[in-house]
Each structure stands twice: as structure tokens, then as C-alpha cells.
Image (cartoon, helix red, strand yellow):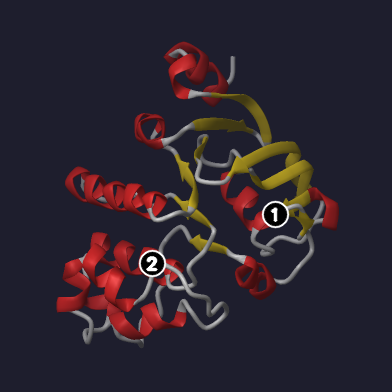
Amino acid sequence: MRLLETHALEAFYGDFQALYGIDLRIDEGETIAVVGANGAGKSTLLAAITGLRQTPPDMVAFDGRPIGGLKPAEIVSRGIALVPEGRRLFPSLSVEENLLIGNYGRKVRGPWSLETIYRLFPVLKERRSQPSTSLSGGQQQMVALGRALMSNPRLLLCDEISLGLAPSVIKDIYAAVADIRAAGASVVVVEQNISQALAVADRIYCLLEGRVTLTGHPGELSRDQIGRAYFGG
């Protein structure tokens, strides 16, 4: 079943056009990866889906209904959650307080609660009373993921969740993404790391200068095809 679609999606920063006619789809229970270099438009795409970048209503549809132009809080309430690049935790709050903020905009029954997030990331339970800024980068990423899960989203958007982390930590974070999918959420992973994206995705979209240059199933695409779509040429 189709969960989210974009239709000829465009996005602007003043007079600068960042996205050009993006057509993308995500089905229930699917994980897709959006790959591309810095400046390709990946984060802008997520911003347009989540209402952080305004679009005409019919350019984004969720569960068959237009959501383009809605405020971010309304989009969260419908079941979309974002793990932003850079984590953006609240430094004055504890780990647990940061997590609890995640369910303010959407209180629904589902698989995710403080208890299940602490099972997913046991180190957060041990450090639940500490300031979020006292954690390592990988642990802060776990808090950001947990905060998004507290809204029990149907669609989880992950923006560069491996950026700047050690390989062993990236492995743990992506193992958690697999658990999140198994619990019923669809997942979009935005990555610069092509190998990581191919390892987790059912389908990938490659962006270059605001345009989709390649899409398909990882097993059907060669490294040369992906490289040309990623870098141009």
C-alpha cells in the first residue's frame, strides 16, 4: 500500500531552486534510501515532506491525502517523524526529558514507549537523568532516534544518522533501524554513504543538484550506474 508520494516536487530558498520535479514513493513497511553528495537536495526533500519547507498541497501526499503546506506539528500528528541531521537535542534537558518531548504532538498507541526505547538502547536507561550533552555522539544519535519514535510514527525520516560516527556505532544504529522497521514503521534513510544505503534499502533514489538521477532496487543497479548518478557524468 502506498504511504507517501511526492508529485513533481519543487522547493526554493528565495530565488534559488533546490528541488526540481521530484517524484518519489514510499510503500507501507518499506525502507528507501536517498543518496547524494552535499548540496544534492536530500535534506531539502525531507524538509518539504515534514513542512519545514512550504510546498503547494498537492506536491506531497501521505496516506492518500495532500499534506504539502501543512505546519510541521500537523504533519507529526498524522504520523511522520524526523530524525534531523545534527540530532538537535535540547541541551538543558536530560536524556529522558528529551525523549518525552517526542510524544507531545502525537499520542497514539503503538510499539514505542520509554520502556521499549530503553530496551532498544539500554545505555539510555542507564543515563536517563544525565544532560543530553554529556553523552557521546553515538548515544546522542540514539536519543534523537528515540525521541522520534516516541510519537509512534508510521513513517520515520532519518537525515544523515551515521554522519561523524565510528563504524562500530554506525553498525549499532542501523541494527536499531532494522528493529524499527520490524515494528511496523516505513523508513527513509538519507545518506552520503552509498554502501550503508545499499545495505539497508529496498529501493534507492539518487539525487544530483536537486533532481532524481537514478532509482531502483539495489540488486539491480551497478556501482558504475550509482557512481555516475551520484557524481554526474
Q: Residues within 10 Å of mark 2 (few under 14, many from 20)?
A: many
Q: Give the image location of residue 212, x and y in percent.
A: 66, 30
Q: Residue visible at 37% across and 50% down?
A: 182
Q: Secondary structure at mark 2?
A: helix
- Tell me, yes or no, whether the two marked residues, 1 and 2, touch with CB atoms within 8 Å: no
- Using the rendered image of the protein, determine whether residue 5 is visible from the camera's viewpoint: yes
Q: Residue visible at 79% across and 63% down?
A: 69
Of the 4 image quadrants, the one containing the C terminus is top right
Q: Nearer the viewer, mark 1 or mark 2?
A: 1
Q: Secondary structure at mark 1?
A: loop
The answer to which image quadrant residue 118 occupies is bottom left
The answer to which image quadrant residue 80 occupies is bottom right
| Circle 2: residue type | Ala
Residue 104 appears left or right of 55: left
| Circle 1: residue type | Asp
107 or 24: nearer the eye? 107
Q: Residue visible at 48% across and 68% down?
A: 152
- Using the rendered image of the protein, determine whether residue 56 is visible from the camera's viewpoint: no
Q: Residue visible at 25% across and 59% down?
A: 138
Task: Identify residue for label 2.
Answer: 144
Task: Identify residue for label 1.
Answer: 63
Q: Residues within 10 Å of mark 1 (few under 14, many from 20)?
A: some
72 or 185: nearer the eye? 185
Above or below for 22 versus 150:
above
Question: Of the residues under marks 1 and 2, which one precedes in the sequence?
Answer: 1
Above or below for 126 versus 187:
below
Mark 1–mark 2 distance (CA, rounded to whole Å): 25 Å
Q: Give the image location of residue 201, x and y in percent.
A: 44, 35
